[in-house]
Image: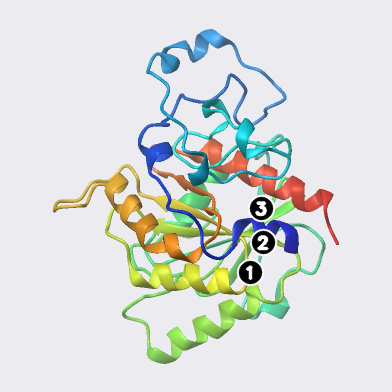
Amino acid sequence: MLLWRSLTSSISWPRPSLLTAASVHRGRIPLYNRLNPCKPIAAGRRAASFAAPQPELVREALFVPPGVAKENVTVGMVLPGSNIVVGPYAGDARIKHADFVKSSSRAKDCPKDDRPEFAVIGRSNVGKSSLINALVRQKDIALTSKKPGKTQLINHFLINKSWYIVDLPGYGFAHASESARMDWSSFTKGYFQNRDTLVAVLLLVDASIPPQQIDLDCANWLGRNNIGMTFVFTKCDKTKGGKGSHPADNIKQFQELIKTCYREPPPWIMTSSVTGLGRDELLLHMSQLRNFWGNNEE
């Protein structure tokens, strides 16, 4: 889907702002069911969340999907803890079924069907498996381990019998052999360049630590190859000691470093697999990417 990928991976973008992450927090969202926008929810359930004053909207920092004019965007259209605007392609995002399908050692061995898929990638120990488990609400569907680099294969999980979440091997595991690290590079790049059903990459970035060059390198490679991505900042519930260690500060630093690489801001969202922060919002964002892809197949 070249059109959608160009929207999410355009080179060289205006200066980003952390405004929507720091001030558009959980609760500042229109009165719709976040997983099923077609089903309204009672105003009383969320009334307390709307007591805070509305922040100024910086439209240049937003990811505006197809079907929405930037000048028509309002604060209520922005998903909390993100720069993502909800558009007309957002639909029912509930996950009702999730099943492990297979592990593949080569890209050509991956499932061969027309179902859309989202690839989850990130530095080892960034929390890929934890995020997948949180999204599908199954504790052990994706393997978690205290040892970074445990995922060594391409793992496909079938969601609602209609689309895939794909768990890719983590990169940057310092204790892996040099040959293993090189194998990861060619192995994973081969997947990206040969999957016509790839809707977007969820590039996970650890928000509990300062920006890492390896994450910037991965983002730049995806951008150069016109592969659409969403930055998913993980561990946003954690604050480690030391200056500049707060997740919001680390996210702002990351945005400052990446700002010269994109004409338009890629979508990004704050998450925590511990507290559930960003889960529903991320699934809603994935639904609009998936539905646009499904309606515009070439």
- The residue lying at 57 percent from left, 46 percent from top is 63
Circle 3 residues within 10 Å: few <14, some 14–19, many ≥20? some
Q: For the point 72% across and 49% down, which residue is it?
A: 290
Q: Amino acid at mark 1?
A: Asn
Kind of residue at disc 2: Ser
Tell me what residue is drawn at x 70 percent, y 21 percent: 39
Image position, residue 49 (x, y; %): 43, 18
Residue 157, can we see it? no
Q: Are marks 1 and 2 in contact (CB under 8 Å)?
A: yes
Q: Nearer the viewer, residue 38 or 248?
A: 248
On screen, residue 158 above or below 39: below
Q: Please state the horizontal and vertical placement of residue 112, each as a whole percent of the image.
A: 79, 69
For label 2, the SS is helix
Q: Hey, which residue is sitting farthest bottom in the picture?
A: 179
| Residue at the spot 22% in from the left edge and 52% down from the top edge | 245
Instruction: Tell me the CA gap for discs 1 and 2.
Output: 6 Å
Quadrant occupied by the N terminus: bottom right
The answer to which of marks 2 and 3 sits earlier in the sequence is: 2
The residue wearing badge 1 is 226
Instruction: Identify the disc placed on residue 6.
Output: 2
Residue 294 visible? The answer is yes
Nearer-N-terminus badge (3/1): 3
